[in-house]
Image (spheres, rainbow, N blue to C red):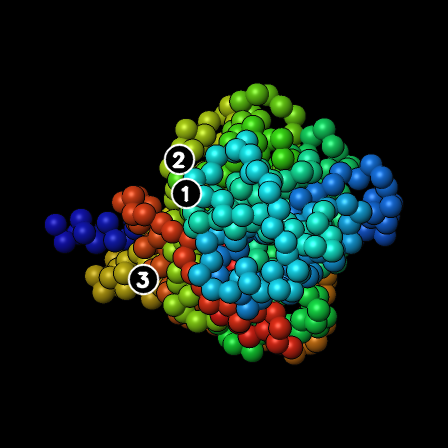
Amino acid sequence: MRELAREFLRLADWGVFAYFIALNSSYLVLMLLAGVEFAKHLRRSPFAGEDDMFRSPLTLPVTVIVPAYNEGPGIVMAVQAMTALRYPRYEVVVVDDGSQDDTFERLREHFDLVEVPRVVPAEVPYRSEILGVWVARDNPEALTVVRKTNGGKSDALNVGINLARHPLVCMVDADSVLDPDALLSVAKPFGDDPLRVAACGGVVRIANGCKVVGGRVVDVRMPRQWLVRVQVVEYLRAFLMGRTGWSRLGGLVVISGAFGIFRRDLVVTIGGLAHDTIGEDAELVVRLHHYLRQHRRDYRVIFVAEPVSWSEAPADLRTLGRQRRRWHRGIAEILSKHRHMIANPRYGRIGLLALPYYLVFELLAPFVELSALVLVPLGLWAEAVDLGFALRFALAAYGYGLLVSLVSLLIEEVSFHRYPHWDDLIRGVGAALLENFGYRQILAVHQVRGAIAAWRGHQAVWGSQERAGFGAPTMETVGAPKR
């Protein structure tokens, strides 16, 4: 019996070892694909034609939808920035989802809002009560603010979709600051390939530590807090590099709710955002893939790496834990809801490659991470493995992971050079080192809790989160960006 247990531990340890090799190798492959895409992007950017797009009367107009819940400290500056974007024709629709702070009062005072008798249609379902619709007195075509009872983020976005007057809808978090040309860049694929592009995601970066003036990020710096610095590295690796790689493979299934643009007709056709999952942004993209594959449509869902939406990141472990529980719960809910697509050749690369990857290397990763913390020491104690194996395991799980993070920093530096100061790059390297000592393990606990909550069917809500806002010269903030 003892020999059987020892053999089990030996096989389990080697299985975990192989898992980390495969996981980090997949990250590295996605990064290399992203690097190729960035090189092409940099060669094309001088001839991208964004100025022509800005001047063209044929450029598709956009409705920017901003769901807001208790966003008082930063809402005015965020909306100011969104109403001053460089784009020929667009409107901003802010949906106040039953805020309990002064979100609406700040908007009304600053933009001189006046109530109008406008009916909200129900092309996509929403469950809350509309309390009123307001527009800016000086420019009623540019800004609309809706007040409604609390119904969650999906509900708020669906109300915004119903009020949208333009063929493209862009969903942006209220705690975000967009680069001036962000809307031009994320909408450009629809002008380049209007018959096939169904959705386009933009990159989200962390604004903590940056200097924000007049709703614009004017000086990019690494945050002062190490917890946030680690998240900067994580965002580069998982969001910028990972999603660019998946876009190049034709398997993009996540467009961040913080910055994404969709064809309104398709969103309405598939019923808007779902109310039964907390990962409403990614679920919408998966459902869009499902619909278009079912109807044998030739389509593209893509990702652009520039310009940027800047968002606040959690600056304390408690807020970060809530965020990651929510994100991982969303992954679990989406994979469960669309499990019939997984490994189904009918859905092409989405079914055969992207969704299995998210099942094995996203959903299960924290479970394997925590299992390794038990299995490897237990294997050493039972003499199922030796110290040589433990060293190789550490190199595969943490050394290889560090290499992947350093590669992401290198690619970002060569491609975009968003952090112009050498000391910021050194801090990024330090954060990549620190990520392996406590950060990964703590997040794994929260991620496991999120997945278990989804499987148990516990009710999820769009909770209140503190905001420091964008008014300070440097944003050391405690908000939480959405995935």
Task: Name the residue at the left extreme.
Answer: 1
Binning the other alpha carbons within 10 Å of mark 2 as few (below 14), some (14 to 19) or many (20 upward) gives some
Earlier-in-chain disc, 3 versus 1: 1
Tell me the tag on residue 337.
Answer: 2
Give x and y (percent) for residue 421: 70, 76
Give x and y (percent) for residue 91: 69, 47
Tell me the tag on residue 333.
Answer: none
In the displayed structure, does residue 38 sit left or right of residue 172?
Answer: right
Check contact, mark 1 vs mark 2: CB within 8 A: yes
Q: Which amino acid does label 1 sit on?
A: Thr
In the displayed structure, does residue 236 sit left or right of residue 46?
Answer: left
In this rendering, the answer to whether 58 lies above or below 91 is above
Binning the other alpha carbons within 10 Å of mark 3 as few (below 14), some (14 to 19) or many (20 upward) gives few
Nearest to the observer: residue 110 or residue 395: 110
Q: Which residue is drawn at 39% across and 40% down?
A: 276
Nearest to viewer (mark 3 / mark 1): 1
Give x and y (percent) for residue 44: 82, 48
- Alpha carbon separation for disc pair 2 and 3: 31 Å
Visible residue check, residue 428: no
Q: What element carries label 1?
A: loop
In this rendering, the answer to whether 394 lies above or below 22 is below
Earlier-in-chain disc, 1 versus 2: 1
**Which residue matches tag 1?**
277
Q: Which residue is drawn at 74% across and 41% down?
A: 61
Nearest to the observer: residue 174 or residue 257: 174
- Alpha carbon separation for disc pair 1 and 2: 9 Å
Q: What element carries label 2?
A: helix
**Which residue matches tag 3?**
373
Nearest to the observer: residue 227 or residue 98: 98
Q: What residue type is labelled 2?
A: Lys
Binning the other alpha carbons within 10 Å of mark 1 as few (below 14), some (14 to 19) or many (20 upward) gives many
Give x and y (percent) for residue 183: 72, 50
